Image (cartoon, grey):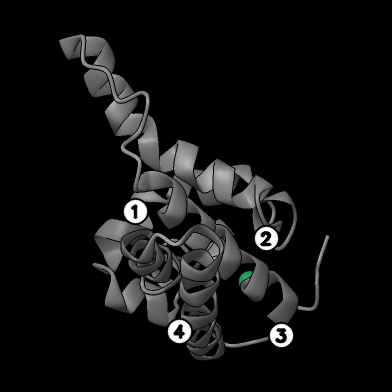
Amino acid sequence: MSSGRAHAWASFVGAFAIGIAWGKLTGDWGGAGVAFLGCWPSGVVLTPDLDTAEQKTIEAERTGGRVWQGYWYLYARCFRHRHMAHCPIVGTATRLLYLAIPLLILSFVFQLSFWPPPPLFWPWAVGLVWSDALHWIWDGCPL
Ligand SMILES: [Zn+2]
């Protein structure tokens, strides 16, 4: 089991890898920078460990503490720690959907549309998935 600090460090190092990979594969170096930001710091803020109700992690301390933890309390109650919400892609999707709830409410109330997302959403999301994959590996690939 890794600490929040180890996960944050893995995301930081992994951000360079995903940024370079995105740039080399697509030729889009602006998107590469966004993929970097999706992995770090976004991967640290939107950590798979948000499935821990008693979260007392470096991420919580860095990201608004109790307000951030309070927002994720219901999410943590819905998912068992280190299960589905920890899996790369599936866990990332659950956290993005949970994060989008206020946007979905706003779009319903004010008849706004947030779909399709802006083009830079995709490299950001790939960076976030990469960060989650690194987190999952560092946790010992729990299922
Ligand atoms: Zn974890």
The residue under label 4 is which amino acid type? Phe
Badge nearest the viewer, 4 or 1: 4
Label 4 vs 2, first from the N-terminus? 4
Label 3 vs 2, first from the N-terminus? 3
In this figure, which residue is indicated by the disc labeled 1?
Answer: 70
Label 4 vs 1, first from the N-terminus? 4
**Whether residue 125 is situated above or below residue 40 in the rendered picture:** above
Marks 3/1: CA–CA distance: 24 Å
**Whether residue 75 is situated above or below residue 87 in the rendered picture:** above
| Helix, strand or loop at mark 3 | loop
Task: Tell me if mark 2 has few (under 14), some (14-19) or many (20+) residues whose alpha carbon lies within 10 angstroms of its own.
Answer: some
Residue 45: image location, x then y, percent: 38, 67
Does label 3 point to a residue whose CB lies under 8 Å from ligand 1?
yes
Badge nearest the viewer, 3 or 1: 3
Q: Quadrant location of residue 41?
A: bottom left
Marks 3/4: CA–CA distance: 18 Å
In this figure, which residue is indicated by the disc labeled 3?
Answer: 1
| Helix, strand or loop at mark 4 | helix
Q: What residue is shown at x 33% (from left), y 23% (from top)? A: 104
Does label 2 point to a residue whose CB lies under 8 Å from ligand 1?
yes
Q: What residue is shown at x 21% (from left), y 16% (from top)? A: 112
In this figure, which residue is indicated by the disc labeled 4?
Answer: 12
Marks 4/2: CA–CA distance: 23 Å
Compared across the picture, whether 6 is left or right of 35 comes to: right
